[in-house]
Amino acid sequence: MGDLVPFNSGGLSAKPPRTAWKAINQVKAENRVRSAKLEAEAEYQEELVIAMTQLANTTLSAISSLSQREQLLSQTVPFASSRLEYAGNQFAVILSDVLATAARKLGKL
């Protein structure tokens, strides 16, 4: 009977070693950093959507205003209607190009 060893004397400890705690804390810290990065990216994407929406709304409002003015002037001076239509179309194309360029630039930020 003298060769029996108590369970906890030099055997497995119920308490994990310090290196295990360090590893666990490192994983927790990495997860917090990863979560913060994902949250920042989501906020950035949301800001891009807001900026593009505002720009698109401004562009659409400008084109709408131009179309109303074109119609009014065409009724006032019917002989100029084709020129007014051409100028309005060119302006709409230019604004569309500005919108597309801004979208590309915002996407590269």
Image (spheres, helix red, strand yellow):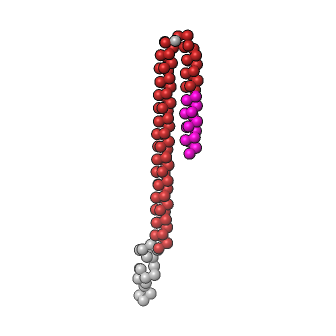
The residue at the far bottom in this view is 2
Along the line of sight, the residue nearer the viewer: 68 or 29: 68
Tell me what residue is drawn at x 56 percent, y 13 percent.
80
Along the line of sight, the residue nearer the viewer: 32 or 68: 68
Percent x, y of residue 108: 58, 43
The residue at the far front in this view is 77
Percent x, y of residue 64: 48, 24
Q: In which quarter of the image is the N terminus?
A: bottom left
Percent x, y of residue 37: 49, 53
- What secondary structure predominates along the stretch shown in magenta? helix
Tell me what residue is drawn at x 47 percent, y 62 percent.
29
Answer left or right for 101 relative to 34. Answer: right
Percent x, y of residue 39: 46, 51
Q: Quadrant of the C terminus?
A: top right
Answer left or right for 19 relative to 93. Answer: left
Tell me what residue is drawn at x 42 percent, y 89 percent.
2
Tell me what residue is drawn at x 46 percent, y 58 percent.
32
Q: In which quarter of the view is residue 96 placed?
A: top right
Along the line of sight, the residue nearer the viewer: 81 or 21: 81
Vertical placement of residue 38 versus 79, above or below: below
**Does residue 103 belong to the magenta stretch?**
yes
Please tell me how many numbered marks the rendered image carries. 0
**Does residue 89 belong to the magenta stretch?**
no
The residue at the far top in this view is 79
Q: Give the range drawn in magenta.
A: 94-109
Q: In which quarter of the view is residue 91 placed?
A: top right
